[in-house]
Amino acid sequence: MNAILSKWRAGKGTFLLLSGVVACIAAAFATGGADEPGFAGLVGAVFAGLAGGIVGTAASSRRHWPVPAFSLLFDFLLALVLLWLVRSALPGSVGPLPGLPFWFFTVAAWLFAWSVVNRMSVFAAQGWLKSALGLAIPALFGLTVLFLWEAVTRGFGIPFVLLPPPSAIGARFAASIPLLWADFNQTVLKAVLFGFVVGSGAGFLVALLADRYAFLANGLLPIGNLVSALPIIGIAPVMVIWFGFDWQSKAAVVIVMTFFPMLVNALAGLSASGAMERDLMRTYASNHWQALFKLRLPAALPFVFNALKINSTLALIGAIVAEFFGTPIVGMGFRISTEVGRMNLDMVWAEIALAAIVGSLFYGAIALLERAATFWHPSYR
Amino acid sequence: MPSSPAPCITASALSLTFATNDGPVHALKDVNLDISKGEFVSFIGPSGCGKTTFLRVIADLERATGGTIVVNGMTPHQAREKRAYGYVFQAPALLPWRTIEKNVALPLEIMGVGAAERTERIARTLALVNLKGFEKKYPWQLSGGMQQRASIARALSFDADLLLMDEPFGALDEIVRDHLNEQLLQLWARTQKTICFVTHSIPEAVYLSTRIVVMSPRPGRVIDVIESDLPRERPLDIRETPEFLRIAHRVREGLRAGHSYDD
């Protein structure tokens, strides 16, 4: 008990102690609520788990591998089990709303998961353990958020149209894979990728030209600012009229949206190399292209990747929003606008989830490339 | 040792005026100077005296606005096009995405030297600056002194017989600087290059040079040229000898005389 009290003072075991207290209160309530399914087992599991957690925390105070690492692993798995147990105690969509004990268990499980995340993020790990932690921390954090979302939406009986529980969204997602794939194919593989590659590529090439010929930079940049200030909902209908209903008009919107961020960033990047380095190239009597390829383009890479990352999100937004303005009966934007009209909010959320996954993967892939290409930059080395 | 001094750099009545918003700035005014092949000439003076500008005029990084300057019998522009000199800047200016050997290879790539000869020259110049074994390191993995040595290797790699150095050791601590000065002298003895060396350190100028050019600011001009009679073989403790101190004293006198105290 002394150990726990000192932890309390140190602020480390706060969550653990709190979750223990809340679980005790929950247990006191639960003795009268044994008619709710699975509750007896839940009470037992919560107590066993918390006991293990407290032992683990006490052991981890010494901070030596492997004991704290194993106790952390144990607590991590325990947190997953607890979240799952409390979640499975939720009534079905037609049953009565859960009572007070359920909410105490929810809070206890949440606090416990919080304490585990807290301890994982201050844990000094190296090597593979560090990368494993880097995955485990956001995983547990995200699962806890989903758990609370599920508990609140189903526990309080929130109307489906307002906010469906994540389990319903997941079920809809799993059941509509072919449909989602068709939408993904139409919106991402055609409009987004084509528009992103052409828009960013053209922006980059024009930046090279504008860097060589000053009149281009002076004339193009003000127009560029004007075009990039155009609202997408203004140009999307125009593009549909110009390029038709299919993905080409969406790709055109994406091109317009991604061209200028790349142009502006690449131009800035091309002047990012230092005066001394450029003097150095001059002392070698290097020509324009040698200086470009050996000095100024590598120095511009951080800027170019910055533009690519900006463009990856812009492209997805552009393609989805452009589909609101006339499209064949496939595509992520089309699906969202149609299913909202039919009050099928779980399908809308499934598309939102798909867009989030695709956007993150897209961004992540570019970030990985950036790391490999600009390993020398002070922010990475 | 060059017994019949062939001229390497000849400046006569050289002037350079920068037009600024506050009116013209006379960076160089009426500079006359001859530098022979194989000499080690130091330029010393307070900041703004035009010593770096003079070096940049030789390198065709600035254009003189008056007078004439001849480098290796050519205009500075022709000399630069012929890659007649290696230039070492105040900072190493190594490209961080290239390893040390790739950095040394940079001028060779630009000048179109073949791969086999590149390898050979990289090995030779890195050995010359005692950087063997660091070929695969990136610049940011080395200390400041090692980085500056790598940049000297880069300037030496294409075998120009003129080496222009603009306060190359200015940012380094005194112990490293002593060490590099010693190495630079050995390198000069081995390679027989002509070296123009800008510094603001009196001991450094006296220790290294066969000739010391004392300059003064506003307008930038030469106020004294001191021939050093120190032997070519110079251990570091030569700096304690009376001859050394006598030359250092004369440099200091020159700097004092040229300094305008009215500002």
Image (cartoon, grey):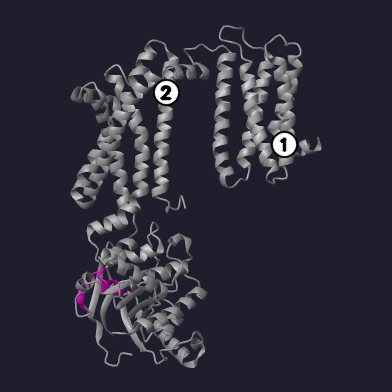
Q: Position of residue B69 (x, y in %)?
A: 22, 78
**Amino acid type, mark 1:** Gly
Q: Report the number of numbered marks.
A: 2
Q: Residue at x 26, y 29 (%)?
A: A251
The chain letter under disc 1 is: A
Host chain of mark 2: A
Look at 25% across and 74% down and name the residue there.
B84
Give the percent coordinates (x, y) of residue A34. Answer: 73, 11
Q: Image quadrant of residue A98?
A: top right
- Is residue B47 inside the magenta stretch? no
Looking at the image, residue A82 lies above or below residue A255: above
Q: Quadrant of the N terminus of chain B?
A: bottom left
- The span shown in magenta is B51-69
Question: Tag 2, which secondary structure?
Answer: helix
Name the residue tied to disc 2. A352
- Give the labeled residue for mark 1: A56
Q: Are marks 2 and 1 on the same chain?
A: yes
Picture quadrant where residue A186 is located:
top left
Q: Residue A258, how many percent across, how many down?
A: 30, 36
| Label 1 neighbour load within 10 Å: few <14, some 14-19, many 20+ | many
Tell me if I can see residue A355 in this picture: yes
Mark 2: give few (<14), some (14-19) or many (20+) Cα within 10 Å: some
Decide which of tag 2 and tag 1 comes sooner along the chain.
1
Residue B22 in view in this figure: no
Residue B147, how many percent across, how many down?
A: 43, 66
Quadrant of the drawing holding the C terminus of chain B: bottom left
Q: Residue at x 39, y 14 (%)?
A: A340
Q: Answer with left or right where residue B212 lies relative to residue B57.
A: right
Residues at marks 2 and 1, CA–CA distance in whole angstroms: 39 Å
Quadrant position of residue B25? bottom left
Looking at the image, is mark 2 or mark 1 nearer the viewer?
Answer: 1
Q: Is residue A155 left or right of residue A197?
A: right
